[in-house]
Image: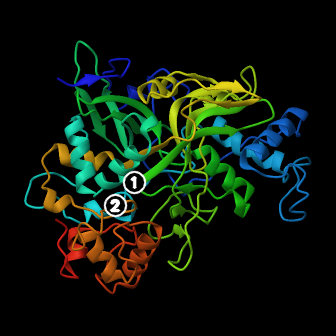
Amino acid sequence: MLNLTSRRTFLASSASVLALAGGCSGSEDTSPEVSDTSATPTLTPMPEITEEDIADAELMAAEFGLDPVNSAVVGAVAPITGGEESKAGKIRRARQQLRTQPDKTWFYWSDDDTNSFDYRHLVAMGETAGESEVSTGLETEPFDLTPELLQTLVDANYFEHSIATTLAENENANGRVIVALRGAEIVNAGSDEDPTVRLRDRRPSHRDPHCVYIAWHRQADAPDTLGVFEGATVPSELYLSIFQALRTPNLKSSMMPQGFHLRRLDNMRLSETNTHSNTLRQASPCPVIREPDPERDVFSIEHSVWDPSSSNASPRSVGAHIHAGYWDVRDGDRWRDWRWKFSSAGCQTVCGSVTNETSRRDISDFYTAMDIPEAELVDGVFTSDKYGTVYPMVLLSGREARMHAEGAPMSAMRRIRFGSSVDAEADPEHPIVQIQEALGVTADGQFGGGSMLKLIEVQRDGSWMIGSAADGIMTPDLAATQLIELT
C-alpha cells in the first residue's frame, strides 16, 4: 500500500484550489486564461513619490541585484529617487497596475499550445497520443499520481541513470527526488481516509501557483512515499510587469526548460537581516527561455529566445533556485498586496514563506517530506549537516503525467531532453548516443546544454524536419528522420 507523507486531504475544484493555506494563494482565480492584449489600462494619477516608496524601491533593487544609487550603471537606468520616471516611480506604477486592476492579466500564459515550449511537442502528435485515445490537449479529468507513474515519466525521458547516479553520490539525500509538474493542480493530497493522490492537468499561470511539487522518497526496502505541494515553476507576473515598467535589459525574467536538473542545499542572503535558509540552489547550468521585448506579455516559441542562443556558447547558472513562494522582507503588512501571489524572476517556488531559519506552511512541510532539517545559525551563517547535498530534480508537465496515467503508449511518449543520460560505455548504441552522433556533438551519453542547443539549431534550420519547433526536445518522429528509434 502506498504510504503518503502529505499533511492534509484537499478536495478542490479548479477555482477553489487557490484557497490552500499558504503565502502563495488566498482567493479564487478569476483571471482569464488569456488577457485582452489590446486593452489600454486606465490608471489613476500617481501620487507624489514618498519616502516609503523609495524604501520599497530600494528593497526591490536589492531583490533584483541592482545598485540602488546606480553607481555602476550611471545613465543606463533611472535613479531610485526622483519623479515618475525614476525606479521608485516605475515600480510604484507596476504595483499600482497589479493592485488597482486585479482582473487584468499583465503577463499571461497563452492558450495556444502549438506556440508553447512546454506543449508544442505534445500537440504535434495530433489529437491523440499514437494509436491510443489519450488526448494531447488540455483535459481536466483528475488522474491518480503514484510512484509507478513517476517511474514511467522517468523512464520515458531517460532520467533514471542521472537520478541513480546523483542519489548514489549524495547519501545525505536519503533517496529523495524532487519532481515538479508545470501546469498541474492538487485535487487530493492524500490522507488516512483517502490515500490516493490525485492531480489535474491545467495550464500554468504567471499570477497564481498552478504547478505541483512532489517529494518522492524512493526506498529499496519499503514502499515509496509521496508528498505533494502547491507552487510555481514559472516567473511571476509581478517581476514580469516590473520588467515591462522599468524597460531595463538586466531585469529580463527567465523560465527553466523541462528536463532533469540538480539542486544543492544551501542558503540565500536576501538582505542585511534576512537569509533564506534551506534554499535548493541551481547546481546544473542550462539554457533558459527569455522574453526580451518588454512590450510583449507572453512567452512563445515565435518570439521568445533561448539564452544562450548558440551551441558555441556555454550555458551558465542563472540562479534559478527552489525557494519559498515569498519571503518576509519587512515586518507588518507592507507587502500584503503581493503575498498571496508568488515571487520569482525565474526560480521555482513552493507556497509558503521564510524568514531566516523559519519556514512556514507548505514550504515547511515540503522540507519535512524531503528530510531537510531546519538550519542552525553557526558563526553567523545558517547551515546544517545536509548543506552541500545535491538532489535530483525532474521538471515535466502535468499534461505528460496525465497522458501517461491515461495509458499513452511509451513508443509515442519517449523523449530525449535536457538531462537525459545513459552510461555510454555500457550501452554505446543507446538512442541518446546515436542522436548525439547525428548532431555532431560529443557522444558521451549526457544530453546536456551543448547537445540541447545543437538540437535547437537543427530544429530552427529545418534540416531534419521542417516545422519542428525549436524547443530542444527530441521526439520519436524527429529521431526517425535520422533512422533512430527511441526505445
- In percent of width and height, residue 322 lies at 53, 41
Locate the N terminus by quadrant: top left
Q: Which residue is mark 1?
A: 260
Give the mark, 1 or 2, whose residue is nearer the N terminus: 1
Q: Amino acid at mark 1?
A: Phe
**Is 8 on the left or on the right of 358, as rendered?**
left
- In percent of width and height, residue 112 lies at 36, 59
> Is residue 338 at all visible to an observer of this figure?
no
Q: Nearer the viewer, residue 225 or 49?
A: 225
Q: Residues within 10 Å of mark 2 (few under 14, many from 20)?
A: many
Q: Secondary structure at mark 1?
A: strand
Q: Residue furthest bottom?
A: 463
Find residue 422 and report its image quarter: bottom left
Labelled disc at residue 176? none
Q: Which residue is mark 2?
A: 420
**Is 213 on the left or on the right of 23, as rendered?**
left
Q: Residue at x 39, y 37 (%)?
A: 212
Separation of marks 1 and 2 at Cα, in angstroms: 7 Å
Is 354 rendered above or below residue 477? above
Q: Residue furthest left?
A: 131
> Is residue 132 at all visible to an observer of this figure?
yes
Find residue 10 and report its image quarter: top left
- In percent of width and height, residue 389 lies at 51, 40
